[in-house]
Image (tube, rainbow, N blue to C red):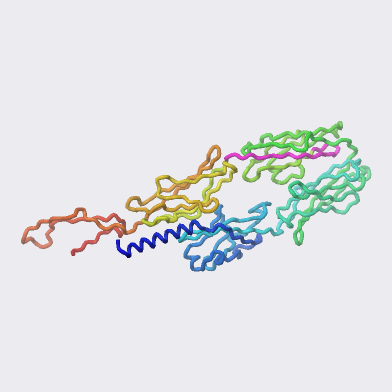
Amino acid sequence: MGIREALTLQNRQVLIFFIVLKLSHASTESVRYSMPEEREIGSFVANLLKDLGLGVEELSFREARVVSEDNEKHLRLNLLTGDLLLNEKLDREELCGSAEPCILHFQVMLKQPLQFFRAELHVRDVNDNSPTFLDKEIILRISESAPIGTTFLLESAQDVDIGRNSLQNYTISPNSHFHIKIGNSVDGKIYPELVLDRALDHEKESEHRLTLTALDGGSPPRSGTTLVLIKVLDINDNAPKFAQSLYEVQVPEDTPIGSWIITMSAKDLDAGNHGKISYTFFHASEDIRKTFDMNALSGEVHLKSALDFEVIQSYSITIQATDGGGLSEECTLGIKVLDVNDNPPEIKISSVTDSIPENTPDTLVAVFSVRDQDAGDNGRTVCSIQEDLPFILKPSFKNFYTLITDKALDREERDEYNITITVTDLGTPRLQTQHTFTLQVSDVNDNAPEFTQSSYTLWVRENNSPALHIGTISATDRDSGSNGIVIWSNL
């Protein structure tokens, strides 16, 4: 081997070493950006050139792109300026619900060499939702003998905004019998209670109509209203009583619709109509009302729509028992949803190469992410490819993987590979997802022509005529296309 060839080989080894070194030192610290929700498409988020430490030309040359775990295209990168821009309008409530902070995780992928830069976008809330009541009218039946200071729970309003933009206060229209008291639930939310200030008289006034207003803390504040209809009843001595204040049940998420969940039961010592009890969901969210159904007479709770552990893991329902005289008592029903392995793993391909040249080790073939929406072992996954292939899988960040060549490929030995990525979860039963793609190996002119034999002996008679055929010499070239065409010449 000559000095030039030795130096070339040494340079290649050094280059491969630094590529591997840079891959192993891909950014592990996330850069955080922030912007409010509901900004228009194309809005400026940040300029990445400084954070990446790159120039505009290198950004384009290395084919920078934004990839996310769920392959959603919330953001796009302008390669001419390095500006990170909104690709779609962001709705914080749709993206994160009540979770705070609302964080979108993404990566910037660079090639030549392969690098990943972790980043996250904090989507800030704006006051774009008003408080709303699920019912346009709340009906209370209150005995005229109810003592001053008695409190009555009212339905809470719903506001999907968070922080100061969420529900902050309740008011009641001016009247001479009631005022509003604000209570705090265990989950930190407020709820309204109606407090009796002055004795009721059924004979003088059998109904009271009040307006309940819910206000958020935005600037300016948004509000929603509902009618509170109070029906004044004759004396009823005893309120219904539940045996316990908290009932708890566990329900698998694959429970069939219509299945019985539990029967709620309260007792009332009164006789006649005052002792007849009806049951309702009280202070219930829209999710509870669309998922469960309660029989008002029997107290049976049935499943109304399918459960999904990956969406909601538990429900806390206030059950109200009301007798015929209008007295009531509440208890809490806690329903815990049990996870079953009903979601197979998902493979999201971010980048895949159709063809690579032979004799190029450590070449990037594909970038993909894996996720499983189940919990525990049901959501843990293992990723693999066929064992007889010259490729390796490398985890990069979180659930991202890169597929690279494990050694130099030889097109003359094999010019095509069918690669199957298999992801299996650890649940019972185990669920599996596969993704198959074909990789072509393109030719490099790495083979010289070869004669079919080492020497040829041809005989010719003297005085032969011109252009007389005296024999055939043949040679072959293992390369393909123009690299495999043999051109003849005499020396």
Q: Give coordinates of residue 360: x percent, y percent.
A: 39, 57
Give the dominant element type of the magenta stretch: helix, strand or loop: strand
Count all numbered tags in the image, as a single digit. Answer: 0
Q: Give coordinates of residue 216: x percent, y percent.
A: 76, 56
Q: Seen in the image, is 480 located left or right of residue 172?
A: left
Q: Seen in the image, is 57 located left or right of residue 322?
A: left
Above or below, 443 against 78 in this view is above
**Residues in magenta, as a range:** 321-341
Instruction: Name the one closer to the observer, 191 or 361.
Output: 361
Q: Give coordinates of residue 202: x percent, y percent.
A: 91, 42
The answer to whether residue 333 is magenta is yes
Above or below, 401 against 430 in this view is below
Give the position of the N terminus as an image quadrant: bottom left
Q: Residue at image x 80%, y 46%?
A: 154
Q: Quadrant of residue 378?
A: top right
Q: Seen in the image, is 43 located left or right of residue 248?
A: left
Furthest toward the left, the residue is: 463
Above or below, 432 against 483 in this view is above
Q: Residue at image x 61%, y 64%?
A: 45
Give the position of the C terminus as an image quadrant: bottom left
Q: Seen in the image, is 243 located left or right of residue 370?
A: right
Q: Give coordinates of residue 356: x percent, y percent.
A: 40, 56
The answer to whether residue 67 is magenta is no
